Amino acid sequence: MRKMGSVLFFGTFLVFFMSSTLAATINFSGTLDIVSDAGGAIYSAVPLGTTLSGSIDDVTGDVEITDGTTPTTIVCCSTPGVLTVTNDMMLSADDAALFNMFLGVPMFNAGDLVDGIDLEGDAPTATGGRIEVGLSYLFASDTFSDTGPGNYPFDPTKVLLSLFFIIEENSGGGEIYSSLGQLTAVPLPASLWLFGVSIAALVRLSRRRQLFSN
């Protein structure tokens, strides 16, 4: 989360294979938990607790999102960058309190290190401003050793917290809206699940071949 207070390793070949061939749309859903609203934004006055759902392309950054009434389509991007990997980000007291609130347990303290992945897209608005929508995944600090794109896709069992965020600016670049919500599940590309299934199938096939060869 660049503007909100800071927020499968199978060998080199497979990391490259997954990153280059598993481009997919990630479907997500979650409720608005935190909102800062100065008015005049696309989702201004949408109440806390509202469910927002949509999808994001993990390569192009194209986004679809709706609150059930107002759909927004983002054909990315007005600023470069869809995937951001963070390694050993130090939490402020506010960061720690925010993450603990979402988790419901006091897991983090100011000064703790965490790793993260952001997937986001942004586009100009009809009023001359900019809207940014994305997903953020939080991990323990030993999950990644660098900020390279090979860290994505990731192991979903290692995700500590997954959020969606919306940020909107006016034509002067001032932030007029920001919101955060916890996702109802860890959303991943369908092709990543299929890749996992194929790995499991290969393992079973290998074991069967070993059995018949004995």
Image: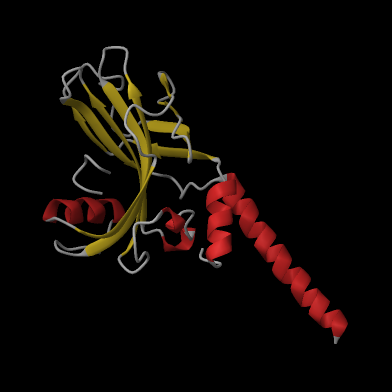
Q: Image quadrant of residue 14?
A: bottom right
Is residue 106 visible in this depiction of the protein? no
186 over 125 or under it: above or below: below
Residue 16 visible here: yes
Image quarter hosting the C terminus: bottom right
Q: For this view, does 56 lie left or right of residue 17?
A: left
Q: Where, quadrant-wise, is the N terminus in this rendering?
A: top left
Tell me which residue sits at (54%, 67%) in the image.
11
Image point (80%, 80%), residue name: 210
Occupied quadrant, residue 179 = top left
Q: x, y percentage for residue 99?
A: 25, 53
Above or below: residue 38 compared with residue 55: above
Viewer-proximal residue among 101 and 17: 17
Q: Position of residue 107 (x, y in %)?
A: 25, 64
| Quarter assignment of residue 144 | bottom left
Q: Residue at x 47, y 57 (%)?
A: 154
In the image, taking residue 154 as reference, residue 206 lies left or right, namely right
Residue found at the far top of this picture: 127
The image position of residue 149, as x and y in percent, is 42, 53
Image x and y of residue 122, in percent: 35, 29
* Residue 18, above or below 88: above
